Image: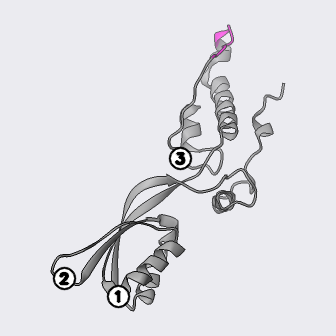
Amino acid sequence: GFQWVTREGVLSEEVMRGIRFNIHDVVLHADAIHRGGGQIIPTARRVFYACCLTAKPRLMEPVFIVDIQTVETAMGGIYSVLTRRRGVIIGEENRPGTPIYNVRAFLPVSESFGFTADLRANTSGQAFPQMVFDHWQQYPGDPLEPGTGANKTALAIRQRKGLKPDIPPLDNFNDKL
């Protein structure tokens, strides 16, 4: 049940990262026939999903590190493109003896589509980026709060995967007895 839940999370059936469950007490049926995987796995899955929904879940997004080589006159275009795409500049340095600058920044992967073309258009073709996966970061916003960017992203993922359109409410995981 635990492996199933962490492989297919409750928000959008994506792999869970950085999650911990504290199990305080478990009471199993005295009869061995009621302690099999067919009884325990679905129950554990419902419990873990309910725990996730009550623990302020968040989406994680992959982030590229971007190395951009450019000349000083194109720096303004680089800064404007990166800020428009939720990029975070972590450093810039001049190569000694040359007019070339190296700019390093973090850029969410979801914002990287069309980035090179946009960068070249804003710098008159004088910026040359290279992007490599660096880390995961928390997507801004609450996916359970309707109308937020995180909620729209979670719903779009659910729609793309052919899941029910809304994030399941907590009532779906309560014991029916």
Residue nearer the viewer, 16 or 91: 91
Disc number placed over residue 73 in the picture, else none: 1
Residue at 20% over, 75% down: 95
Q: Nearer the viewer, mark 3 or mark 2?
A: 2
44 shown above or below 138: above
Residue at 39% over, 67% down: 105
Q: Which residues are magenta?
A: 25-32
* Rendered image quadrant of residue 120: bottom left
Q: Secondary structure at mark 3?
A: loop
Residue that mark 3 sits on: 15
Q: Secondary structure at mark 1?
A: helix
**Most common secondary structure along the magenta stretch:** loop
> Alpha-carbon neighbours of circle 1 within 10 Å: few (<14), some, or many (≥20)?
few
Residue 46 is inside the magenta segment: no
Q: CA distance from mark 3 to mark 1?
A: 43 Å
Residue nearer the viewer, 151 or 164: 151
Q: Residue lying farthest top?
A: 30
Is residue 141 shown left or right of residue 110? Answer: right
Residue at 53% over, 46% down: 15
